[in-house]
Image (cartoon, grey):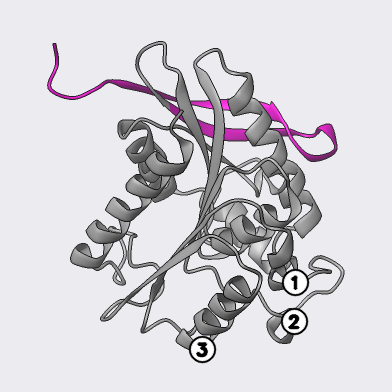
Amino acid sequence: MSSYPGLTAECVMFKGHNGDTVEAYYAKPSGKGPFPGVVLIHHAPGWDEWITEATRKLAHHGFATIAPHLYHRDGPGNPDDIAAKARAEGGVADGQVIGDIAAAMAYLRAQPEASGKVGLIGFCSGGRHAYLCAGSLSNVDAVVDCWGGNKFADNKKDPAKRPIPPIELTEKITAPVLGLYGNDDKNPSPEDVNRTEERLKKAGKNYEFHRYDGAGHGFFNAPKAPYRPEQATDGWNKVFAFFKKHLSR
């Protein structure tokens, strides 16, 4: 018996919002399962190498994980170039994101090794998207927001693409929420995190927030300067514990 569980990882295609074909990176533990599922929502820099590493990391810890390429429609080409193009155009419309994430959740639940439980985790803009989807979809079993900013009406930039600030969907969230934030971050700032926590508390939601001194935006991202190994290690351990608690059978 090997010391570590195996896993498989590959690029897959699935039917996303409006039936569009969308590319995704899918990693799952070896074996028949059943395995709980996680949809990993990439950050504003796009569907990059670190996102695929994080997808495999979750699979290594027992979660069949899919990371949809939300900028896929802006391709084909190098994912970094596609991300730059998408950001220049103001990012992806919220309705399209919700449709793609709902379809990715359905993809996970359709796999023969699936347990049926599916959680969401998002980083940066993906954290905002995770919160948005948790308030828009009724079948999310757990949600992790990693430093998701721009949840409020006062920092909304494009009403056509972002008609409802995610914070206004707080009362509709049915899944437990884990939030991980750096106290040196500017978006979300500590004040933004306080406002989000106040809204969740007022709505009587099941949530837990963890805030890290000495950490700013993107402190999980090992290849980049903001990486903080001690805080990231603790944060990842909280993610694994949270998903095991809420996604286990």
- Describe residue 77's horizontal placement relative to residue 194 as left or right: right
Q: Residues within 10 Å of mark 1 (few under 14, many from 20)?
A: some
Disc 3 crowd, CA 10 A, few/some/many (<14, 14-19, 20+): few
Q: Which residue is mark 1?
A: 168
- Residue 191 — which label? 3
Residue closest to the eye, 69 or 153? 153
Q: Earlier in the sequence, mark 1 or mark 2?
A: 2
Residue drawn where x is 36% and y is 36% of the image: 56
Across and down, in percent, residue 51 comes to 43, 47
> Disc 1, disc 2: CB below 8 Å?
yes
Mark 1 and mark 2: span between their CA atoms? Answer: 9 Å
Instruction: Say which amino acid is labelled 1.
Output: Glu
In the rendered structure, which amino acid carries the disc numbered 3?
Answer: Glu
Q: Say which quadrant the N terminus sits in.
A: top left
Q: Earlier in the sequence, mark 1 or mark 3?
A: 1
The answer to which of 215 and 72 lies nearer the viewer is: 215
Q: Is residue 41 visible?
A: no
- For residue 207, above or below residue 193: above
Q: In the shown orientation, is residue 95 left or right of residue 247? A: right
Q: Is residue 16 magenta?
A: yes
Q: Is residue 194 visible?
A: yes
Assign a secondary structure to mark 2.
helix
Mark-to-mark CA distance, 1 and 3: 17 Å
Q: Is residue 217 above or below residue 132?
A: below
Residue drawn at 76 percent across, 44 percent down = 99
Q: Which range is magenta?
A: 1-27
- Mark linked to residue 153: 2
Please state the horizontal and vertical placement of residue 195, each as a whole percent of the image: 58, 83
- C-alpha distance separating marks 3 and 2: 15 Å
Name the residue type under label 2: Ala
Q: Secondary structure at mark 3?
A: helix
